Amino acid sequence: MDFLAEDNLCGRTLLRLVSRGNAIIAELLRLSEFIPPVFRLDNKRDQEVYGDIITDFSYFRQQDYFDHNIEKRPDLQDLDEQFRENNIDILTRFYLAFESIHKYVTDLNRYLEDLQEGVYIQQTMESVLLNEDGKQLMCESLFLYGTMLLAVDMKFEGVIRERMLVSYHRYSSARAVTDSNIDDVCKLLRSTGFSPVPGAKKPANYPESFFKRVPIRPVFISMVIGRLRSDDIYNQISAYPLPEHRSTALATQASMLYVILYFAPEILHNQQAKMREIVDKHFPDNWVVSVYMGIIVNLVEAWDGYKAAKTALNNTIEQGNVREQAMKYEQCVTKLNPLVKQQLKEGVLTEEFVLDSIPKLMNIIRECNVTIHWMLLHTVESGADLNKRCRQLREQVIADSRYNPGVLFELLLNTAQLELKLKEMFKQMLHDKQIKWEQCKKEGSERVAELGEVFSGTKPLTRVEKNENLQAYFNETAKQITSLSYEDSTSAGRKIVQLIQALEEVQEFHQLEANLQVRQFLADTRKFLHQMIRTINIKEEVLITMSIVGDLSYAWNIIDNYTGYMQQGIKRDPSLVTKLRATFLKLASAMDLPLLRINQANSPDLISVSQYYSGELVTYVRKVLQIIPETMFGLLGIIIKMQTSQIKEVPTRLEKDKLKEYAQLEERTKVAKLTHDISVFTEGILMMKTTLVGIIKVDPKQLLEDGIRKELVKRVAYALHQGLIFNPKSKVSELIPRLNAMGAVMDGFRRSFEYIQDYVSISGLKIWQEEVSRIINYNVEQECNSFLRSKVSDFQSLYQSKDIPIPKFAPVDASVNFIGRLAREVLRITDPKLTTYIDQMTAWYDNKSKQEIITNRLFTKVQKSLGTFGLTGLDRLLCFMIVRELQNFLAVLQRGVLRDKSWLDMFASLMKSLNPVRGIVANATKVYPQACTKASKMWQLFLEVILKVGQIQLLRRQIAFELNFSCKFDSKFLACALQTFNESLLANIEAHYQDPSLPYPKEDNPLMFELTSYLECAGINNPLNKIYVTTQRLAYLPLLNFLFVISQLSRLQYVKAVGDLVCKKPTDGLDGVPFVVGTITLLKQFHKENTDHFLALLGQYVRSMVDSTASNSKSTGLSEEVVNVLAYLEMYMYYSELPRKAVEAHIPSYLFDEFRSNVQT
């Protein structure tokens, strides 16, 4: 029975195990790119912030102390909970990957036990190892476990693993209790002390001590090593018949042996005979091996601490042997390059030539691949070069082989091209094989039959006499040809050879050479018979051998060293992309190794593993071809510079004598040449056919567009980062000059896209808008992360992309990126403590110099430099800042003031003296000041929050004006449609509340949510009406707000010329408009009754103060306190769009009339 048959439980169990092993390694490699940086604790900030909640396995020794330390500090509890929310998903995935390693080795041990105990009928460990498939899978199962351990230590440093496992254990305690594996996983993956940093000292007994953590049967290890030592388990030597190619043929087996020997370190240390045998068979001429998917190991360094292994390897790395090998491969490179080029010349690789030269071509391909394999591995730079002996060997190889990376890379390119052409030809020939056979058979039999007719005498042919014997002979031969069977190709081949020989003899013995036509007929028949033999020889074995020989999996990582040569080649000749396509396809063959077993097992992991490796390769393809957009943008920069600074714009009307001056022939010729160069680069990439790389289809047009997008994103992001850096200590703000410069830069990018789009066949405006919006939205998202408990990681972001990544830059100040710096600079220069906002002018003025600082033109400049996306992004960030301010203030209020009995008693006592609110307070001039003085401890914090919120709200209001204006100007139909839609929707909602039977959008209907985002982008919103935070009912909030307002109004005065409240002294640090807007915003977060109560208290204050003034016969008119409150209320009504009757319900209208007539005029 076939070992891998569906009904063979023993074989299928082992196959599924090996399949899972390959999938685990792919998952480990994938996850290694997503390690949260915070677990590294490699900078001072992370250590200070997270040092108390992230720990290694020392946690298990002092768990109570660690947990108690967090529990006793509310700030740490909050941080710990926030950290859990942000990282539990990714930690769970990491843990499952780590757990799968332990589960794998547990299942392997269970399988070996089942074999031993006879669970699988008629199968033992010995019988499985005698079976060809069984032998391969048994060796692979152990090798993959070893590779997992090496990979996990290489990609996840020990201390990082421990921190992640401890965090997972703490945050998933429910699962950890029920899951007994976590202890075993921690024991297996505790830190080994190994560091992947080049030059780091290797721990003692590493990695054998790591490999021993979960014991595996010694008999199994010994038998696997025995098979690998003695057998060619993958039958590779048949593809490499020459004895000098044996080490390349056994390279896969050698890498398995390298890993598995760590399970039996006594062989490496003491058993010299075995090690000598292993080295002589697998490493006679090579000492650098590829372990798995490009993981490279230098045996000189790896075996340095093992006596027997080191001694055995000495013969290989002996100076004479190294020189001999290096010189041999140098001669091969010199000889093979012209030979391969000769085969690639147009017209050489015809079908006939290929069929006649299969052995010769296979020898060339074999020789090329062996040479490339040895040269790439033994000249690669690696961490092992820090070892003196390794460095000396590499330097000797480079010197003796006269290593030229450009020449070697050329050989790789040409070999890949030759292989690709031959594979395509063979596939086509295999497809057409039977059709051609039948066609040649038909043609051959027809010609021989015609000759029979000629010798019958019935068919006239010049000077051919009737010959019944020849007629019978040719008729019989025609029957023989017709009877040839395609299915029995071996028998048919022998018959064809006999028929060819017979036709040659009949021509010779019957003197038929004299007749030219008969001779031609015989020659044609022989030609068709020869073609049939060639067609028989087209076998799939050739393609299989080519795939084995052409394996490039060892270069999965090394190839990156040659990226520079690829890119320089493309710059010189863009058509090189077609040859690179062949190299990329050759590299894609590396995926066959991990996917073979997964595919055989019909595992659901096939798609995800294929996706990962294909994605990695496509990313590399993009990286190589990125040189084309980079070069294009370089040329484009020169064109734009010439267009803006050298080439004059031709006027509509031009005098004849100035024609030459405006012609500027040289400059225009240069621009035309540069434009042509750009179009040539475009053609280069478009010459590459649509290619299936693994399971990902690579479309050259899409590749070009993505490359252009990537380069655009890189340049624009860098320009925004560099252009929007401000000096906070500068006396004169740099904001306006920086925005002007940024506007010019962005305009240059926009113009360049407009110019180039037709030459490279792309939608320039679409790409520009999509990518700029993505850059700004991503930066806004990252800046807003500092305000969120649940952070948005890069892999969760809607705006970040692996193919077209948005670069991240190190912060230069408290902000994360440019959008934060812009927002904080605007807030700095419009600080209400230093400036005064005049609404009629929509401008901010300096308190001391009275000079204009900022006007509404600021946001026009932001619009010009960052576009609508920039303005809406800035607006969104300002929203988060308001939320943060309000949340912090309300938290202080709830935890401090409203839980303090003394405060509550004071408020209760005051409310008692003020009730009823519609009445008048006796002795108002004493009651109010005393209450304000008692609560004065709160005013500084209250004032800072109110002014900050008011300032941000004014900025948001200005942004909304600018967005609305630009929307009406640039897209009036959109503005009108949104306005109408909004009004009709509001009318429907109001109608629903009057009559609930009418329709209303359901909770899952995204209409209102999506319309809101459109309205905010179009500026059709009032920020002052927005509710930013959800709140609970707070006792005495209107009273507290009222006391705060009247306490601060004494520092303000009403100025008729301005029409607003302004500070009395420039040093007071209080601006009227932000003050009013801030209080409006705070009250807006609560139920409407709070605003009504607040206005009622202000009304009572005004009436009481007027009454107090009236009783004093010396005073005439309104007092300053009353004027300020009335001015405050006028401003309150204006900014909050509150109806006048709401205020006049508490204050007689004649007081407002007097205020307007005596004060405002």
Image (tube, helix red, strand yellow):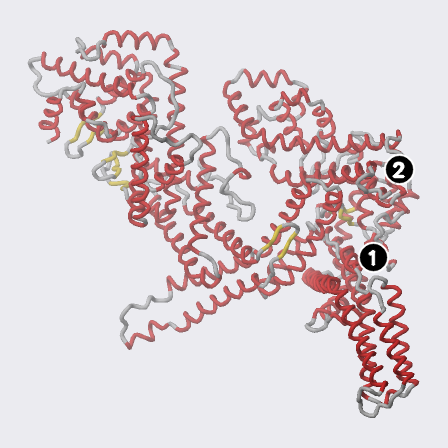
837 or 338, which is in the foreground?
A: 338
* The N terminus sits in image quarter: top right
Query: What is the quadrant of residue 145 in the picture?
Result: top right
Q: Name which residue type carries label 1.
A: Ala
Residue 241 visible from this viewpoint:
yes
In the image, taking residue 1086 as reference, residue 486 lies left or right, namely right
Q: Are the residues at dot 1 and dot 2 in contact (C-beta closer than 8 Å)?
A: no
Label 1 vs 2, first from the N-terminus: 2
Residue 728 visible from this viewpoint:
no
The residue tagged with tag 1: helix, strand or loop?
helix
Local packing at callout 2 (Cα closer than 10 Å; few below 14, some 14-19, many 20+) is some
Up the image or down, 622 lies above or below 1046; here it is below
Q: Residue at x 50, y 21 (%)?
A: 75
The residue tagged with tag 2: helix, strand or loop?
helix
Q: Residue at x 34, y 67 (%)?
A: 648
Q: Position of residue 29 (x, y in %)?
A: 67, 41
Q: Tell me the distance, in whole angstroms, between the alpha carbons under discs 1 and 2.
A: 28 Å
Q: Position of residue 116 (x, y in %)?
A: 88, 31
Residue wearing tag 2:
222
Up the image or down, 733 lies above or below 685; here it is above
Residue wearing tag 1:
239
Q: How many numbered markers are drawn?
A: 2
Q: Residue furthest front?
A: 458
* The C terminus sits in image quarter: top left
In the image, taking residue 877 as reference, residue 1096 lies left or right, namely left
455 or 80, which is in the foreground?
A: 455
Q: Position of residue 623 (x, y in %)?
A: 59, 53
